[in-house]
Amino acid sequence: MPAIQVTNLVKTYRYHQKDPGLSGSLRGLFHRQTLERRAVDDVSFSVEDPGEVVGFLGPNGAGKTTTLKVLCGLLYPTAGSVSVLGHAPSRRAPEYLRQIALVMGQKNMLWWDVPTLESLLLQKDMYGLSDSSFRETLAELVEMLEVNHLLRVQVRKLSLGERMKMELLAALIHRPRILFLDEPTIGLDVVSQERVRDFLLRLNATHGTTILLTSHYMADIEALCPRVLVVDQGRIGYDGSLAALIAQAAPEKRISVTYAQPFSAERFGLDFPLTASKVNLLDDSRRVEVVVSREEVATVAERLLRLGQVVDLSVEEAPIEEIIRRIFRAGREEALA
Amino acid sequence: MIVRSLRRLVKINLIMSMEYRGDLVLFMLNNVAIPVVSLLVWLAVADSGVSLPLDRTQLVTYYLLLSIVSMFTFSWLAELLADDIRLGSLSPWLLRPAPILLSYLANNLSEKILKLVALLPMLVVVSLCFPGDFRLPLAPLNWLLFLLALPQAAALAFLIDVIIAALAFWVDDVRGLSRVRVLVATFLSGQVVPLALFPASLTGFLRLQPFRYTLSYPLEVLTGQLSPSDLRLGFALQIGYLALGWLIYRWLWRRGLRSYAAVGA
């Protein structure tokens, strides 16, 4: 039996449309327009092996978080079936809840006004942990997260990075088999982001915890997830490895160079014979943007640098939204053909 | 496990309340002020020669005991819980293998403990201001029945709060409704005007409506105002309302959780 099995999942939100201003609110009192939005639209996937790390990648509002919330039983599915560790999450059976945990980057689970230790002791009581297993897990997690000195500090006095570590600590104290993470690195600085990622990798390696995470940071997915589900507008557009995804959807990089002097298109054309569609002249011909294949990046950049006095140079991955759009465009064209 | 969790939650709630001491003091003054002001008004009425169904001693005793009973039965829960539902803060409680309302029950209990600790001394002072007029009922049977009716009154008030809060699953603003409930309850529970002072034509309705059983009824039991048949009917109605409230709560929450949107993040 797979650890997670999702079949034709649909989740619809109902909401009210309201015009702005006081008059809009007044009209809303008497006549309200109820609308529906399909946040998740016919999604199917499964996670066969325990211990897998799977990333949901997609822009804001794609349906990643909604899917996660359905999986941990916070939301009732509108249609379709969901089974996690043999349970229907929406029934919220205690045996099920004991085996999972959810950490949300933008939502606190810890009490704001008391030290983390107090919240941890509450978790101990609620999950019925024995003294010895509590102590053992706590010692291990505290060591991994390097937070011994913070246990007795009120949560509201902690920095964002420290708080995220504490959220992870509280979520993992009962040793869940599946950990759901919703944007775990959002708002964190680069160093803190990396610490969180390292911790998750270690957790997965030492305890075989299955991890499902959502993120719109490529770096999170790159570091953690051998398998990626790309979600857009409530549908899954890609299911596979990240490397294959990038090779398939973004085989190119964008080089952008700014020069001190404008230069003519003719000269540019002479020295640099590329197809016009891939070259853009911007800012009164001071800036050049070229999209090239990954293999060509070094040679093309070198040639661009020789064209004049360079003020600025950057080489960028196509943004994640762009990649996703391409995947979905390809999907739709396939469907049409 | 649940009892241990509840104890820990009460402790956390108490710690948090201590963090906001200013709020606490204001809140307590408010709690004593209403009964004391009502009492003073009624005493002025009695002194002006109007004949009331309750004499001076009964009035003083009623209002002083009332402030203690209302400590046990009133709460700020409905709006708090409604906000948590609307803003998605209920989510952590849905993820834990414990009753969803455990934390709210703890909040409610800690509220009562705080009030008891801080208000009792104040009430002793107030009662000293009415020498000779405050008569604590002493009949053991009345106390016994009172100790049964009081927690049931508190449970009924809690259920009413939880039912009103559950409307937040569908309606954005439960505050208005909650205020209306408080206003209605203020009059129908006997908080401002003892139910005995209402016009006789209303007596039948007042005795049967549920708010009586959240405040006035335990007080009537304690002060020995009720005949044995009234006592029996009262307890039957109180238990009946509790059972009805429980059914409505279960039904509303089961449906409500289906439309819970878990807003946020």
Image: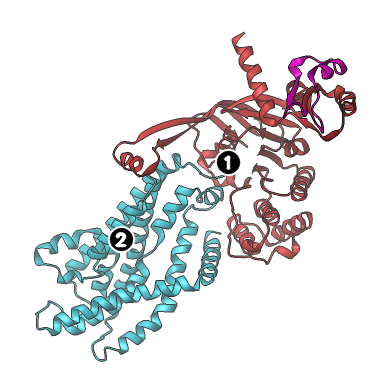
Chain colours: A red, B cyan
Dot 1: chain letter: A
Q: Nearer the viewer, mark 1 or mark 2?
A: 2
Mark 2 lies on a secondary structure that is helix
- Taking the image as shown, residue A90 lies to the left or right of residue A147, namely left
How far is mark 1 from mark 2, CA to CA?
Answer: 36 Å
Dot 2: chain letter: B
Task: Specify few, some or many for label 2: CA neighbours under 10 Å numbering under 14, 14-19, or 20 or more.
Answer: some
Disc 1 marks a residue whose amino acid type is Cys
- Give coordinates of residue B242: x percent, y percent: 32, 57
| A224 or A173, nearer to the observer | A224
- Give coordinates of residue A337: x percent, y percent: 62, 8
Q: Is residue A317 above or below residue B22?
A: above
The residue that disc 2 covers is: B182
Task: Specify few, some or many for label 1: CA neighbours under 10 Å numbering under 14, 14-19, or 20 or more.
Answer: many
- Give coordinates of residue A306: x percent, y percent: 90, 27
Residue B61 visible somewhere in the drawing? yes
* Residue A55 falls in image quadrant: top right
Was residue A272 drawn as part of the magenta stretch in this picture?
A: yes
| A129 or A299, nearer to the observer | A299
Span shown in magenta: A258-287
Residue B141 visible somewhere in the drawing? no
Mark 1 lies on a secondary structure that is loop
Q: Residue furthest top?
A: A337
Residue depicted at x 57% and y 44%:
B265
| B124 or A90, nearer to the observer | B124
- Taking the image as shown, residue B81 lies to the left or right of residue A337, namely left
* Residue A85 falls in image quadrant: top right
The residue that disc 1 covers is: A72
